[in-house]
Image (cartoon, rainbow, N blue to C red):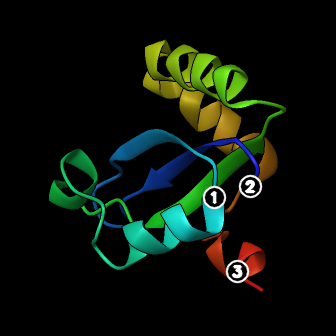
Amino acid sequence: MQPCVYIMACGYNGTLYVGVTSSIVHRAWQHREGLADGFAKRYRTRMLVYYELLGSMPEAIRREKQIKEWRRSWKIDLIERGNPTWRDLYPEIAQ
């Protein structure tokens, strides 16, 4: 298990979801399958566009809270620094 903060995106309306998990592969799969309840399910955030592995869960939670407070434009910049084409990263991590 590896603590991780991640951003999921909806492919058709641009909605972003910032979350934290100890298993990015499993959590991204839940989003893709529509099994993540609440906001993520309602807005169909199914594409993993960013993730950041961290050393501990408290550190990951702090980072998640930090990113959630950011302006949308800052989140987009963060995504585009590592994923300029907004490709779905799930196939790469699910191998």
Secondary element type, mark 3: loop
Secondary element type, mark 2: loop
- Packing grade of label 2 (10 A; few <14, some 14-19, many >=20) is few
Alpha carbon separation for disc pair 3 and 1 = 11 Å
Q: Which residue is mark 1?
A: 23
- Which label belongs to residue 88? none
Identify which residue is drawn at 67% across, 69% down.
89
Q: Which residue is mark 3?
A: 94
Q: Earlier in the sequence, mark 2 or mark 1?
A: 2
Q: Amino acid at mark 1?
A: Ser
Q: Which residue is mark 2?
A: 1
Identify which residue is drawn at 74% across, 55% down.
1
Q: Earlier in the sequence, mark 2 or mark 3?
A: 2
Residue nearest the viewer, comparing 62 with 15: 62
Mark 3 and mark 2 in contact (Cβ < 8 Å)?
A: no
Quadrant into which the C terminus falls: bottom right
Q: Amino acid at mark 3?
A: Ala
43 lies left or right of 79: left
Alpha carbon separation for disc pair 2 and 3 = 14 Å
Residue 86 shows up from this direction: no
